Amino acid sequence: MKKNKKSKTKLNPPPWQELNIFLLSKIFTFLSPHDQLFITPYVCTSWLHATLHTLFPNSTLPLSPLDTLPQIQRPRFTHLLKLAVDRIDGWISISFPSKHPLPYLLAMHIAERTSNISSVFLPSYPSSSLCQAFLSLLYWKNLRVFRGPTDKLPPSKGYLLLAQLIDHCKGVVDLGFHGEVMEREVVSIVEGVPLIKVLDISGSRVWGKGLKVLLDGRLKFLRELNVMHCLFVGDDGDDDVINDDYEKMKGFKEEVFEKVSRLKGLKKFLHCFGKNCQQCKDGVKPVTS
């Protein structure tokens, strides 16, 4: 009897467009920004999705590439950014650019479609980005972390941003705010974000009594407070700088440390009291509108 010969079939490998999107995105990370922006998105729909996952990974919208991309590449980046926001759900974090802000309409488009954003980072203070963040807070009601510009905000703009944040984002637990922290800002923080756990006001011009208010126990969940390189002023304003008077500073530090010792929940109090800090010796210049 003749044995039936099994026909040998040649197995064809699957086409590139059928590869797993996340595997493709890993491969695309080795490509240049030009190739990611102008070549891979045009191959097919699958490659477009993979490119979006390459540029905007891990549920984060990192917009800092706008600061480093050449002018000719920025429009293409913002186009792909809009596609990513429209096609992918679950964005939880956004970091604004520091030099080249988003176009206004695109910023509003992103805010409207990312209501689940829980973390916002503003690396510096361009007026346009500040305005975009101010309006975006109307949509980000689930915000938990807000890190404002590390360079000090002008008093009027800083307070407006803080008030907007407190009015619309009641669940903030991590706040970075740098600029003028006087009576109205202190009251806003204590009354507006009672659930706060981490507060960073480093490098700010701070009302001396305001720091004592922050430490009076009303912020029951406060775990970390950063007052590094702050300029503390008394009730007489600019002419009453506590840092410049040895006796006043000594008494001020004793009162602050006494209040800190009573807060059992406060695990970290970052300061440069009594240290040879050159930045504090140079002084924190008042910010102007």
Image: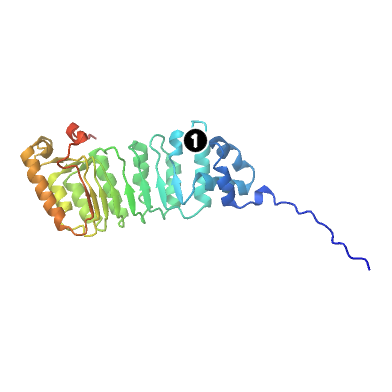
Q: Nearer the viewer, residue 228 or 175?
A: 228
Q: Residue at x 19, y 42 (%)?
A: 272
Q: Nearer the viewer, residue 135 or 73?
A: 73
Residue 235, percent from left and from top: 9, 42
Figure quadrant of the N terminus: bottom right
Residue lying furthest front: 1
In the image, is residue 264 above or below residue 245?
Answer: below
- Way the structure is coloured: rainbow
User: Quarter-wise, where is residue 236 in the image?
Assistant: top left
Left or right, residue 81 beside residue 243: right
Q: Residue at x 19, y 49 (%)?
A: 186
Circle 1 SS class: helix
Q: Residues within 10 Å of mark 1 (few under 14, many from 20)?
A: some
Q: Residue at x 18, y 43 (%)?
A: 206
Left or right, residue 2 beside residue 43: right
In the image, is residue 221 above or below residue 158?
Answer: below
Residue lying furthest right: 1
Residue 253, percent from left and from top: 11, 46
Q: Which residue is mark 1?
A: 74
Q: Residue at x 71, y 51 (%)?
A: 13
- Can the viewer see residue 111? yes
Residue lying furthest left: 247
Residue 259, percent from left and from top: 13, 54
Figure quadrant of the C terminus: top left
User: Quarter-wise, where is residue 116 in the image?
Assistant: bottom left
Left or right, residue 9 beside residue 278: right
Residue 185, percent from left and from top: 21, 47
In the image, is residue 146 above or below residue 66?
Answer: below
The kind of residue tagged 1 is Arg
- Can the viewer see residue 284? no
Q: How many marks?
A: 1
